[in-house]
Amino acid sequence: MRSVSEIAAPSSDWTLAASIGLNTNILEINLINLILVLGILFYYGKGVLINFLENRERTISNTIRDAEERHEEATKKLHKARFRLQQAKVKADEIRINGLTQMDREQRDLVDAADKDLKGLEDSKNYAIRFEKQRAIEQVRQQVSRPASERALEGLNSRLDNQLHLRMIDYHIDLFKAMKNKSD
């Protein structure tokens, strides 16, 4: 085994660098310097590195925890939204069914009202037809009865003499007297 002094400065190189005490062999010096630097860094930087890693671990765990909480919250919101969506679908179906029912009811009411109006118009038409028929019949009666009455009156006037006329008056007077006696 070599001593530390040989590692730091081998005996062959002491003549060259005797006054300073440095080793000029680059390969050996870099390895030694690297070991020394790593050792010093490990010794003094161990606490800093541990603190850094612990902080990083805490940050990562907090981030994971926050992400899980947000995931749970988002899941709850999703369930609530799905529930509200389902309720909205049910409500929309109810509104659609009610709308269709109301539309059918209004359509039936409209048809019934139209039938009622049609029946009223039919009745009015029939009444107008009957009225016009009665009026036409009455006009025909008057047209037929007037000439017949005139002919009958002419016939009576031609046959009626004073004697027959007096007998008719006496007959009606007796008829009135008989009615008067019955009423007393």
Image (cartoon, rainbow, N blue to C red):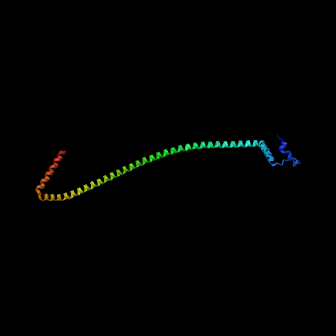
Q: Quadrant of the N terminus?
A: top right
For the point 16% across and 47% down, which residue is it?
Answer: 178
- Give the farthest residue toward the right: 19
- Camera-nearest residue between 3 and 158: 3
Q: Percent from the top left, x then y, of residue 19?
A: 89, 48
At horizontal 65% and vertical 43% (from top left) the residue drawn is: 64
Q: Quadrant of the C terminus?
A: top left
Residue 101 screen position, x and y as percent: 42, 46
Q: Foreground residue, 86 or 160?
A: 86
Relative height, residue 175 to residue 155 (above, below): above
Quarter where residue 138 is shown: bottom left
Q: Residue furthest left?
A: 163
Residue sticking out furthest to the top: 1
Question: Is 131 on the left-hand or right-hand side of 183?
Answer: right
Q: Nearer the viewer, residue 16 or 158?
A: 16
Camera-side residue: 68 or 36?
36
Is 55 situated above or below 164?
Answer: above
Left or right: residue 130 versus residue 75 is left
All told, the count of numbered labels is 0
On the image, the x and y values in percent for residue 128 come to: 29, 55
Residue 170 is situated, as x and y percent measured from the top left of the image, at 13, 52
Q: State the residue at coordinates (74%, 43%).
A: 49
